[in-house]
């Protein structure tokens, strides 16, 4: 299927989908590779170990002109035809790719200073503002305690590259600091340590939020108070999605126990309704902005969600089950949810093929901006972010409008009496824990 740029693009939450993919269209004047010699013939992709097949399938769908060329677990290259017109800032909308860029080739050797010199040689005269260095994943996340992330070796190599830069004035002082994301529009030298002695060289132009992070990864540290690693997953999801959740907003979490993700939300000043039949950690339960409904989501009355504007979900169930549960909530006439972050567990890798249908299903509920990504802190699962923009609250039901009118009438007749609570008063907001 050819690339359908209209289907693949569109504006998303700040930082997403800014760039179209005109590979089969006439070249765009802005940012086009003008000289044949400037036009790299390969792309690289880094991903979670195990996701390679999913990446190849997505590439075949989204960029059929690219052909798989070289592969190691967690690292792939694709060959492009000579006549491609991919601009420097391209977005292929690959859910399973953690980082993507143009690939120039590999350098090998045991002398790191010599390797650093070769990297700059391979880059040619291209001007870059930033240097991103990261290691290919060694194992699937969680296996033998492996966690994808930025490593001390990568930090050392980044420093070496910065020192070896033939034109140091073009780099900013923080050019190789992974804690400082690249600026939009920066051209970034990418160096992937496929093996400690085999470095792969490429570049990309930073534009989407994830393309500004080194290897698509964040140097996040789990805070001491976090009760589960889901804190990292939620923090990354919030930073990646850039959902415009204001402090004080009401958020419901389906599958909240023991509470790491809830803590990331509470840390941002949100009010959280946690729904889970399992126990919450006592420190989460004690938080004044947290309310627990100790039930399965299917047993919770819809009116509990009346004031909820944001929904997150991390239930350890199949994606269809998650989507059924979420659909029953967000399409209910009493409920107006503006945005969501859903973790979809891919218990089998073949479920990766269903991801476009999952996205389509969420769109059909009225979310015009929907993106998905396998986050650095995701296991065999993906994060789906959805937003209604502009947000239109569903009108209150007729009986609610009548009740409000009656209350206003009564208040006018008895000016000294405090008015009763209007629509949306929920038992959940009055007690800090609901046992089923
Ligand atoms: C991966 S854990 C959630 C981790 C949690 N988000 C955290 O931050 O610590 C999955 C949770 O989903 C809950 N769960 C599974 N099915 C559920 C359902 N139908 N309704 C509510 N929770 C459910 C389980 O009880 C389990 O606690």
Image (spheres, rainbow, N blue to C red):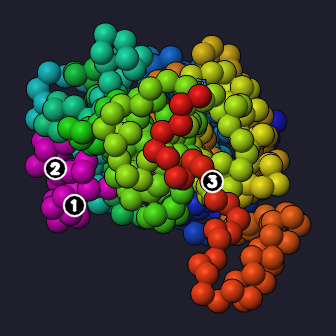
* Labels 1 & 2 near each other (Cβ < 8 A): yes
The CA distance from mark 1 to mark 2 is 8 Å
According to the picture, the residue beneath numbered tag 3 turns out to be: 426
The answer to which image quadrant residue 69 occupies is top right
Q: Badge 2: few (under 14), some or many (20 or more) residues near its Cα, within 10 Å?
A: many
Q: Secondary structure at mark 3?
A: loop
- From the viewer's perspective, is the residue at label 1 or at label 3 nearer? 3
Residue drawn at (52%, 52%) of the image: 430
Residue drawn at (70%, 31%) of the image: 299
According to the picture, the residue beneath numbered tag 2 turns out to be: 162
Residue drawn at (75%, 81%) of the image: 410
Compared across the picture, whether 259 is left or right of 168 comes to right
According to the picture, the residue beneath numbered tag 1 turns out to be: 171
Q: Badge 1: few (under 14), some or many (20 or more) residues near its Cα, within 10 Å?
A: some
Residue reaching furthest top?
Answer: 144
Do we see residue 123 in this rendering? no
The answer to which image quadrant residue 18 occupies is bottom right
Residue 234 in picture, x, y percent from top left: 44, 42
Does 152 appear above or below 82?
A: above
Q: Tell me which numbered mark, 1 or 3, is placed earlier along the sequence.
A: 1
Residue 91 in picture, x, y percent from top left: 58, 50
Compared across the picture, whether 406 is left or right of 249 comes to right
Counting every numbered tag in the picture gives 3
Q: Tell me which numbered mark, 3 or 2, is placed earlier along the sequence.
A: 2
Q: Which residues are magenta?
A: 158-181
Residue 351 in picture, x, y percent from top left: 68, 21
Does 411 appear above or below 252?
A: below
* Labels 1 & 3 near each other (Cβ < 8 A): no
Q: Badge 3: few (under 14), some or many (20 or more) residues near its Cα, within 10 Å?
A: some
Residue drawn at (17%, 54%) of the image: 166
- From the viewer's perspective, is the residue at label 3 or at label 2 nearer? 3
């Amino acid at each position: 299927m050819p690339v359908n740029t209209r289907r693949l693009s569109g504006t998303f939450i700040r930082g997403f989908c800014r760039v179209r993919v005109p590979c089969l269209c006439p070249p765009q004047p802005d940012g086009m590779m003008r000289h044949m010699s400037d036009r790299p013939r390969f792309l690289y992709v880094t991903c979670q170990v195990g996701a390679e097949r999913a990446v190849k399938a997505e590439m075949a769908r989204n960029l059929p002109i690219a052909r798989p060329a070289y592969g190691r677990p967690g690292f792939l290259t694709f060959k492009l035809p000579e006549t491609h017109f991919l601009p420097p800032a391209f977005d292929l909308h690959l859910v399973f790719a953690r980082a993507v860029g143009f690939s120039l080739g590999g350098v090998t050797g045991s002398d790191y200073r010599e390797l650093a010199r070769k990297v700059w040689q391979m880059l040619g005269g291209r001007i870059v503002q930033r240097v991103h260095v990261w290691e290919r994943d060694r194992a699937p996340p969680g296996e033998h305690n492996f966690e994808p992330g930025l490593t001390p070796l990568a930090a050392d190599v980044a420093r070496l590259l910065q020192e070896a830069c033939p034109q140091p004035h073009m780099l900013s002082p923080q050019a190789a600091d992974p804690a400082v994301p690249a600026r939009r529009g920066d051209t970034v030298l990418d160096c992937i340590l496929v093996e400690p002695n085999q470095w792969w060289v490429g570049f990309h132009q930073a534009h989407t939020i994830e393309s500004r992070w080194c290897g698509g990864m964040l140097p996040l540290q789990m805070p001491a108070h976090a009760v589960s690693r889901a804190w990292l997953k939620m923090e990354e999801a919030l930073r990646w999605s850039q959902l415009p959740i204001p402090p004080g907003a009401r958020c419901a979490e389906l599958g909240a126990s023991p509470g790491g993700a809830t803590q990331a939300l509470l840390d941002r000043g949100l009010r959280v309704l946690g729904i889970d039949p399992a126990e919450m950690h006592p420190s989460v339960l004690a938080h004044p902005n947290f309310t627990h409904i100790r039930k399965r989501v299917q047993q919770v009355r819809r009116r509990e969600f009346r004031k909820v504007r944001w929904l997150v979900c991390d239930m350890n169930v199949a994606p269809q089950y998650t989507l059924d549960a979420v659909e029953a909530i967000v399409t209910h006439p009493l409920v107006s949810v503006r945005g969501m972050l859903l973790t979809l567990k891919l218990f089998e890798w073949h479920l990766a093929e269903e991801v476009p249908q999952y996205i389509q299903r969420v769109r059909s509920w009225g979310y015009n901006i929907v993106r998905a990504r396998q986050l650095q802190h995701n296991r065999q699962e993906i994060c789906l972010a959805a937003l209604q923009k502009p947000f239109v609250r569903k009108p209150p039901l007729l009986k609610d409008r009548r009740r409000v009118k009656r209350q206003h009438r009564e208040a006018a007749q008895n000016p000294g009496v405090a008015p009763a609570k209007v629509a949306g008063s929920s038992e959940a907001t009055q007690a800090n824990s609901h046992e089923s």
